[in-house]
Amino acid sequence: MPRAQTDTKAEIRAVALELFARKGFDRTSLREISERLNITKAALYYHFPSKNDLLRSLVEPLGEDMEALFARYGPDGGGGAGDPRALLGDYFDVCVRHSALLVAVLHDLGSLAETGLVDSVISWRRRLDTLLVGPEHGVPARMGAVIALGGIQDLSVMFAPEEAAAHRERAVDIAMAALESGMSGMD
């Protein structure tokens, strides 16, 4: 029976993301993805020539969202966030939106490091840190930013997206308290 007209690429990405988050990238086969969708492996290869190509297509939206975030708050940092609460809230939204991908990264950190995603996440976090506290502040201020950002990112992998989103304002309050605590150590 032929498949209904659908966005096969989007379906492949959705199933792959779910399996990568549940089982890990290395332990998920393209055969398993194709069987789950009731398509041939050849059809899957038509859309994604390799598992790494499929993974890159999953990572791309996160990169786009992060670049949009930097465009809103200042691409190179420099303490230009202006409103740290808004920046932390927007970062929370990005992390929750991409929580399944972040969980998948934790399952296969070594394998996914080859894609450059781990380096990108570290680079994004450094840029966010600089936006929040500026480049000139020392360790105490940076600690507050690291804890604020890390806490937000961790919430997205520890809680279901709906549950995390329901407590967004409280999460941002807690992140702000960590940031302010670090900033108070600048004196």
Image (tube, rainbow, N blue to C red):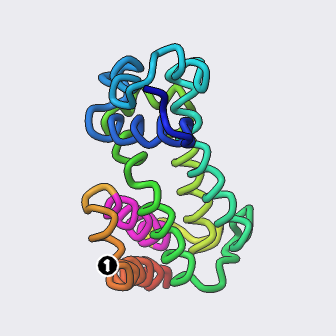
Residue 18 horizontal/vertical position (percent): 35, 42
Residue 105 makes an appearance in the image: no
For this rendering, which residue is in front, 144 or 54? 54
Image quadrant where one finds the N terminus: top left
Quarter of the image holding residue 99? bottom left
Specify the segment rendered in magenta. 141-156
Q: Residue at x 64, y 66 (%)?
A: 69
In this rendering, is residue 187 above or below 10?
below
- Amino acid type of disc 1? Ala
142 in the magenta segment: yes
In this rendering, is residue 141 above or below 117?
below
Residue 101 makes an appearance in the image: yes
Quarter of the image holding residue 26? top left
For this rendering, which residue is in front, 6 or 105? 6
Q: Circle 1 sits on which residue? A: 166
Q: Residue furthest top?
A: 42
Residue 8 horizontal/vertical position (percent): 54, 36
Q: Residue at x 48, y 32 (%)?
A: 3
Q: Main secondary structure of the magenta part?
A: helix
> How many numbered discs sit on the rendered protein?
1
Residue 122 horizontal/vertical position (percent): 52, 48
Q: Residue at x 59, y 50 (%)?
A: 61
Q: On the rendered structure, is 79 left or right of 187?
A: right
